[in-house]
Image (spheres, rainbow, N blue to C red):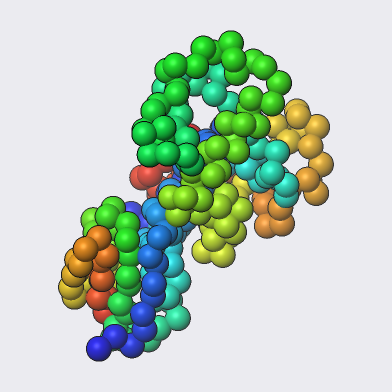
Amino acid sequence: MADETLDASGLNCPLPILKTKKALSKMDTGKILDVISTDAGSVKDIEAFCNQTGNKLISTVEDGGKYVFTIEKA
Amino acid sequence: MSDNKKMTIIATKGTFDWAFPPFIIASTGVAMDKEVTIFFTFYGLNLLLKDTSKLRVSPMGNPAMPMKLPMGPKWLQKIDFGPKIPNIFWSLPFTEHLATYLMKKTMKKNGVAKLDELRAMCQEFDVKFIACEMTVDLFGYNKDDFIDGVEFAGAATYFDECDGSNHNLYM
C-alpha cells in the first residue's frame, strides 16, 4: 500500500517527472509513492528517472491507457 | 547513479515555440539530480522577461512546422495545413497571433505545461539563470525587465559553469 499517491493524469512530458520529483522530495526514505499517469512516454521516463536518482521503481502497471508506477524513495 | 552531475544550456531563441526546449530539458535535468545552468543570450533573453505574453510563434520561414487545428470535427483536425499555406500568408498582420493562439490551445489540450509554469519550476528546483550582459545592453533592456533571480554575466562565466559538465547544449 502506497504512503502517497500522485495523480498526474492528463499531464504531458516533462510534468509527470517534475511532479514525481516534487512529491518524493517531501517524503522520507523507504516510503512508497504511487504515480498515476496517462502519458505513454512516462513508462520509459519514470524508469530513466529512477535509474538516475537512485529511487527504486517497484512496479509498473498498465490499465487501459492509465499507468501506475510504484516507487520507493531512496 | 551517474557521476556526471552538471549540465549547461545556451538558449538563443526567443519565439514562443522555441522557449520550451531549454526549460523542459533544464527542469527535467534538475529533477534527475543534475546541476543545471542556462545562459540566455541574444533573442533567448526574451525567455527571462517578466511578461512572456508577447512571445509569438513565427510560421514565416518555418516550413517544417505542422499546423493542425486543435478544435472542430475530427476529419478537419487531421489535416496538416503547414505545407498547404503559402509563406506569403504569414507576412500578413496578426497571422502570428493566430498561429500562437492555435499553438497555445493545442498545448493546453495535450496537457503541456504553461511556459511561465515551467520557468517557475526551473527556479524552484534551483536552475541557475544567467543573462548575457552584452546582449542585455545591446538590445537596450533594463535589468528590471527580467524576472527575479537572474544573474548578469558574460561568456567567461558561461565557461566557468561548463567546468566539469559533460552536457552542454546549444538551443
Which quadrant holds residue B74?
top left
Count of marks placed on residues: 0
- Residue drawn at x 40%, y 26% is B80
| Position in image of residue B35 (x %, y %) | 45, 57
Q: Quadrant of the N terminus of chain A?
A: bottom left
- Residue drawn at x 19%, y 75% is A58
**Viewer-closest of B166 and B70:** B70
| Position in image of residue B156 (x %, y %) | 58, 38
Residue B49 seen anywhere in this rendered image of the structure: yes
**Viewer-closest of B33 and B166:** B33
Which quadrant holds residue B169?
top left
| Position in image of residue B131 (x %, y %) | 65, 43
Q: Quadrant of the C terminus of chain A?
A: bottom left
**Viewer-closest of A23 and B150:** A23
Residue B93, compared with residue A61, is above or below; it is above
Q: Is residue B121 left or right of residue A13?
A: right
- Residue drawn at x 39%, y 75% is A6
- Residue drawn at x 63%, y 42% is B47
**Viewer-closest of A61 and B37:** A61
Q: Is residue B123 left or right of residue A67?
A: right
Residue B119 seen anywhere in this rendered image of the structure: no
Residue B91, compared with residue A22, is above or below; it is above
| Position in image of residue B22 (x %, y %) | 49, 43
Q: Is residue B76 left or right of residue B126?
A: left
Residue A32, compared with residue B8, is above or below; it is below
